[in-house]
Image (cartoon, rainbow, N blue to C red):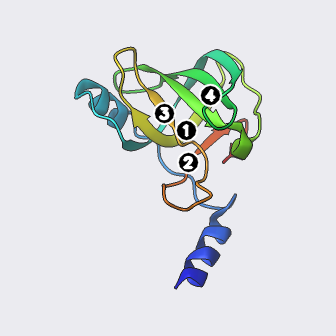
């Protein structure tokens, strides 16, 4: 069974169908102060935060203004050990899949990469026709 799962995961890397963004899921989680919500959102970069040291490895961050729903601005964090660095500029369109965590200033979407241990659903960042996971 593990071999089958590994083959399915390997086949998905870089070739899975795009998932549809649901900005309303983040708006609802924010309004209810809920965390640990798997989401796919899209929006425009409002600010690039750059790369900072993380607890375990460096993370690249940016602020993303959701395109629909409540038009909330959320922070997005990506572990560069997995995603590598990616070019971003204010106004750039981005789609993000990850886990939403509430905090009063908008929240954060993290786990925007694959989980090497396979215990957490993988995420991604898509921009400029490329997917970083």
> What distance separates the C-alpha of mark 2 from that of mark 1?
7 Å
Count neighbours of disc 1 (C-alpha within 10 A) and say few if under 14, some if 14 to 19, many if 20 or more. many
- Where on the picture, by quarter, is residue 80? top right
Residue lying furthest front = 55
Q: Do the residues labelled 2 and 1 touch (CB within 8 Å)?
A: yes
Residue at the (73%, 42%) spot, across then down: 81
Q: Do the residues labelled 4 and 3 touch (CB within 8 Å)?
A: no
Whether residue 130 is visible to the viewer of this picture, yes or no, is: no
Q: Mark 3 against mark 1, which lies toward the viewer?
A: 3
> What distance separates the C-alpha of mark 3 from that of mark 1?
8 Å
> What distance separates the C-alpha of mark 2 from that of mark 3?
10 Å
Whether residue 16 is visible to the viewer of this picture, yes or no, is: yes
The residue where tag 4 is placed is: 93
Left or right? Give the position of 89 relative to 38: right
Residue lying furthest bottom = 1
The residue where tag 1 is placed is: 96
Q: Mark 4 against mark 1, which lies toward the viewer?
A: 1
**Total label count?**
4
Given residues 41 and 124, the one toward you in this image is 124
> What distance separates the C-alpha of mark 4 from that of mark 2?
17 Å
Residue at the (62%, 40%) spot, across then down: 125
Q: What element carries label 1?
A: strand
- Where on the picture, by quarter, is residue 85? top right
């Amino acid at each position: 069974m593990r071999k089958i799962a590994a083959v399915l995961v390997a086949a998905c890397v870089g070739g899975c169908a795009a998932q549809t963004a649901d900005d309303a899921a983040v708006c609802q989680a924010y309004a209810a102060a809920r965390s640990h919500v798997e989401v796919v959102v899209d929006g425009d970069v409002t600010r690039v935060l750059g790369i900072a040291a993380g607890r375990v490895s460096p993370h690249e961050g940016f602020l993303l203004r959701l395109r629909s729903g409540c038009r909330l601005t959320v922070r997005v964090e990506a572990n560069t050990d997995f995603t590598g660095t990616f070019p971003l500029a204010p106004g750039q369109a981005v789609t993000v899949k990850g886990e939403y965590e509430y905090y009063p200033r908008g929240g954060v979407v993290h786990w925007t990469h694959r989980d090497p241990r396979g215990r957490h659903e993988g995420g991604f960042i898509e921009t400029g026709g490329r997917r970083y996971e």
